[in-house]
Amino acid sequence: MLTEVLQTLPQVLIDGLALGAVYAVIALGYTMVYGILELINFAHGEIFMSGAFVGTAVLIIMTSLGWTSMLPAVLSLIIMLVITSLITGLMGMGIERVAYRPLRKAPKLIALISAIGISFLLQDIVRFITELYKGNYILNTPSLFSGQHQIGSFLGANDASFKTSFLVVIIVAVILMVGLDFFVNKTKWGMAMRAVAQDRDTASLMSINVNKVISVTFFVGSALGGATGVLFAVQYGTIDPYIGFILGLKAFTAAVLGGIGNIRGAMVGGLLIGLIEMFTAANLSVITDGILGAEYKDVAAFAILIIVLIFKPEGLFGKAAAEKV
């Protein structure tokens, strides 16, 4: 059994890192909003999904105009990321202004229900528009980085392969995560975000525009979610209006696993969930002697989350909050 597990390990690491990077960047959007508003923005998964569709639409338009054949693939990707990030960032700001700000003083459950409603609304809007123009709500993304690469076997493992898009996803995801970490910890806007997260009322008394800070938080988080949707479309090639639900749920799980509200914890949690999921999909049948198959990979990821929360409820990198009495 151990030999079979080791043989699949290189491919598991490649696939797990690609998927984990996607989870990690999506999880950043959840953890940013929660850190400031203590609100679980369940519409964030649909922002990610919208980004995948916007990016695919931009790529299809560029391909029809012949731009992709004239421009380097990297430049085409940059154009997709910039346009998509701007659109989804503005979407996030609009959602915050319309659906969350009026409910800011309402019970948290009301805002949560509003977030779920926005989630379903975005799903149906994207499905309607896609079917209207394409006749089908499932889209195939034109290939940008389709080169295939082989890694030779080592330590008795099987050969592993990856597409050029894998490297693109990892590089761009790392740039986004490092950029966000720098933005939050080294800039004035980041300092304002941390001040609002610590004490919103005191921050407002210190001449910080709380509404503007929250809007910027939603813009940045949603822009990251949209950019991640582009990476997902480039890596996996097929998208539909419902990819945001399960991926968003797993990204939220990653944020909780790392410590909800902790940006670096969300990054690590996303990578862990991706690696666990791919390892389970590849080896669960071997480990259980065929009793359980790859379809139970989600169960393993959530089971590990439950175990972590039982023994460390604040997550791997979170800090236990003192209860005020």
Image (spheres, rainbow, N blue to C red):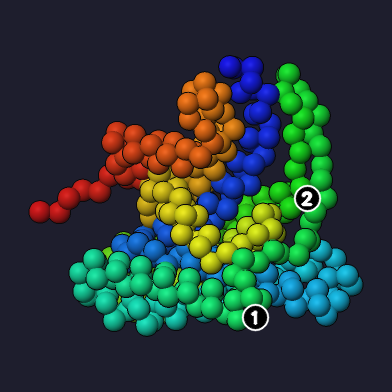
Mark yes or no: residue 86 visible.
no
Q: Secondary structure at mark 2?
A: helix
What mark, if any, has residue 281 been given in the picture? none
Q: Are marks 1 and 2 in contact (CB under 8 Å)?
A: no
In the image, taking residue 304 as reference, residue 81 lies left or right, namely right
> Badge 1 local density, few (<14 within 10 Å), some, or many (20+)?
few
Mark 1–mark 2 Cα distance, whole angstroms, equals: 30 Å
Q: Secondary structure at mark 1?
A: helix
What amino acid type should be assigned to the residue bearing mark 2? Thr
Residue occupying the point 73% across, 18% down: 156
Residue 59: image location, x then y, percent: 73, 71
What mark, if any, has residue 164 been given in the picture? 2
Mark yes or no: residue 177 visible.
yes
Task: Give the mark nearest the N terminus, 1 or 2.
Answer: 1
Q: In the rendered image of this protein, does residue 17 appear above or below residue 159?
A: below
Q: Nearer the viewer, mark 1 or mark 2?
A: 1
Q: Which residue is mark 1?
A: 133
What amino acid type should be assigned to the residue bearing mark 1? Tyr
Q: Quadrant of residue 79?
A: bottom right
**In which quadrant of the rendered image does the N terminus lie?**
top right
Residue 159: image location, x then y, percent: 77, 30
Residue occupying the point 79% across, 56% down: 145
Residue occupying the point 78% across, 61% down: 144
Q: In the rendered image of this protein, does residue 24 appear above or below residue 307?
A: below
Residue 178: image location, x then y, percent: 59, 55
Q: Quadrant of residue 13?
A: top right
In the image, taking residue 98 as reference, residue 187 lies left or right, namely right
